[in-house]
Structure formats: C-alpha cells, structure tokens
Image (spheres, rainbow, N blue to C red):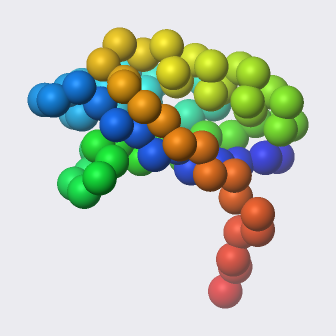
Amino acid sequence: MVEAFMLIQTEVGRAEVVAKQLAGLPGVVSAEYVTGPYDVVTRIAADSQDELQRDVVGRVQQVAGITRTLTCPIAEVARP
C-alpha cells in the first residue's frame, strides 16, 4: 500500500464543497478543509505508486474548483 498527502488550493469559497466531493472518491482516505496556504488536505492511497499517480491523483485533479495540488508521498508511517 502506497499513501500520500495532497495539499490542495481551491477557488475562493470552494474549499468545503471540494473537500466533500473528494471524500467520496475511490482512493481518498480522508479529506478536510483547512486554513492556511492550502484549502484542503487529503490522504490518498493505492496499491502501487503508479496507480496512486495515474488513477487517484488524476481523479482528484479533475474535481471542479481545484486550482493547484501538491502531492507528498508518505515515506514511512510512524507507529508508537
């Protein structure tokens, strides 16, 4: 399993709507709208890096209202 965080900028006033749309997409583990330089933060997952980039990131970037994304692959999950 490969996971990443996507930091997303949206059109003004669209963060909540975009987050709700993203939450229903296959491969999206979570989606929250936040404050700061990015409007939405999602956690995404797939079986391979190729599938993550091709399918999940591709689906996310097609959502109306998104203006820019930054994908941050998770190198290692810290466990207590």
Residue 18 occupies which quadrant of the picture?
Answer: top left
**Residue 53 drawn above or below residue 39:** above
Which sits in the foreground, 37 or 57?
A: 37
Q: Is residue 16 above or below residue 38?
A: above
Question: How far across and down, in percent of the image, does residue 28 sit?
Answer: 56, 34
> Which of the image's four quarters has the C terminus?
bottom right
Q: Is residue 12 left or right of residue 50?
A: left
- What residue lies at 52% left-to-right and 24% top-to-bottom? 60
Report the number of numbered marks.
0
Residue 29 in sight in this render: no
Whether residue 66 sits left or right of residue 26 in the image: it is left
Q: Is residue 8 left or right of residue 29?
A: left
Location of residue 29 in the rendering, given as x and y in whole percent from the top left corner:
55, 41
Which residue is nearer to you in this view: 31 or 7? 7
Residue at the limit of the structure toward the bottom, as seen here: 80
* Residue appearing at x 56%, y 50% in the figure: 5
Q: Which of the 4 image quarters holds residue 26?
A: top right
Q: Can residue 69 be seen in this view?
A: yes
| Residue drawn where x is 34% and y is 37% of the image | 9
- In-front residue for pair 31/10: 10
Provide residue 34's location: percent of width, then percent of height: 26, 51
